Image (spheres, rainbow, N blue to C red):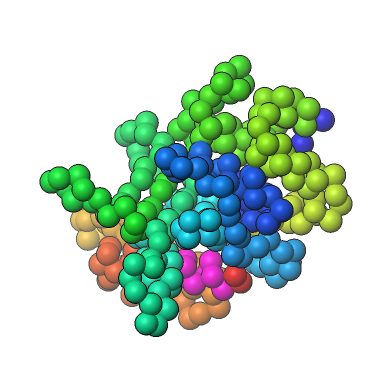
């Protein structure tokens, strides 16, 4: 029987990569993405997996914060959908990790790189087959980079060329994309045969435990439902906002009214989920698209962090 556990669901993702005893799996994923000259050989999880974290959370909990043996600060998260200002939020997190290292009176030479890594089960950059983007501080003219600064990585999993027949000889990042997207469809023996390295064996053991352990499976199913409910609510708000935006656009002769209406609908839903007074559609559609995007991003961040 297939395992039936999707590693991209927050409970499974955090238990695999956010448990200190699964350091091999986390290092395997990081090394596959970062492709460093010297691989990561040690890592400390700063916000370890806990059952209480998920028992109390109403929202998805998908980030893993860690520090490797060289002092690099790392934030790894899984996103099942994209949203406006995603790159700005990822940059903000990387900057925060970079700044937080420096204690009063410490020299700037003590600073180590800060990296944010976002895995996406969706397309972020359309019109290109490039799956992994690495953003860093670099001089455009000379190509010189500040190598010990901040970096933002985005990994669009669905863009990888994944086939069972070739996955054993594929690159490490292809193999991790395969595991994250398709592990639920395989029985344990076959999955272990396809992905024989120690890092994958450890990750497979975790999802096998979730599938077999009653309490873990119940929590996994609850988190899957929570994600579906959240996605349904956001999609409903998007469609409602688009319809209102069309009306607004027809009245004012502005095509951009559609996009602004969609954002306004999402903002109203986010305010409702946060228990805050709900802005009227008329009030929201009077604001610029930039203002709406900033407000939506702010509300999403607060909603995401409320139960962290």
Give the residue furthest to the top: 165
Q: Nearer the viewer, residue 5 or 293?
A: 5
Q: Residue at x 70, y 70 (%)?
A: 56
Relative horizontal placement of residue 49, taking residue 40 as reference (left or right) = right
Q: Which residue is drawn at 34% across and 74% down?
A: 107
Residue 258: percent from left, percent from top = 32, 54
Residue 96 visible (yes or no): no
What secondary structure predominates along the stretch shown in magenta? helix
Residue 229: percent from left, percent from top = 63, 56
Q: Residue at x 55, y 59 (%)?
A: 66
Residue 205: percent from left, percent from top = 76, 41
Q: Which of 197 and 283 is in front in this view?
A: 197
Look at the image and say whether residue 54 sits in the magenta stretch: no
- Label count reads 0
Question: Quadrant of the rendered structure where residue 20 is?
Answer: bottom right
Residue 185 visible (yes or no): yes
Relative horizontal placement of residue 245, taking residue 214 as reference (left or right) = left
The residue range painted magenta reads 298-306
């Amino acid at each position: 029987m297939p395992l039936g556990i999707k590693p991209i669901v927050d409970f499974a993702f955090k238990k695999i990569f956010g448990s200190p005893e699964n350091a091999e799996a986390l290092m395997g994923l990081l090394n596959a993405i970062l492709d460093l000259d010297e691989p990561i050989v040690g890592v400390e999880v700063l916000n370890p997996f806990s059952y209480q974290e998920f028992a109390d959370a109403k929202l998805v909990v998908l980030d893993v914060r860690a520090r490797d043996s060289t002092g690099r600060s790392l934030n790894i998260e899984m996103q099942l959908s994209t949203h406006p200002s995603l790159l700005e939020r990822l940059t903000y997190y990387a900057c925060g990790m970079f700044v937080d290292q420096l204690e009063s009176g410490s020299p700037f030479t003590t600073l180590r790189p800060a990296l944010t890594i976002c895995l996406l089960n969706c397309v972020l950059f359309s019109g290109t087959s490039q799956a992994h983007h690495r953003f860093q501080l670099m001089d455009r003219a000379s190509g010189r980079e500040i190598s010990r600064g901040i970096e933002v990585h985005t990994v669009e999993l669905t863009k990888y060329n994944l086939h069972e027949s070739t996955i054993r000889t594929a690159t490490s990042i292809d193999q991790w994309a395969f595991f994250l997207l398709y592990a639920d469809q395989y029985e344990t023996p076959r999955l272990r045969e396809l992905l024989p390295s120690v890092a994958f064996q450890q990750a497979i053991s975790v999802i096998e435990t979730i599938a077999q352990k009653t309490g873990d499976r119940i929590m996994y199913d609850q988190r899957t439902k929570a994600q579906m409910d959240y996605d349904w609510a956001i999609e409903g708000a998007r469609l409602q906002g688009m319809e209102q935006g069309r009306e607004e656009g027809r009245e004012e002769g502005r095509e951009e009214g559609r996009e602004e209406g969609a954002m306004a609908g999402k903002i109203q839903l986010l305010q409702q989920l946060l228990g805050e007074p709900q802005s009227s559609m008329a009030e929201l559609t009077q604001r610029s698209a930039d203002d709406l995007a900033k407000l939506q991003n702010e509300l999403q961040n607060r909603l995401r962090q409320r139960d962290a």
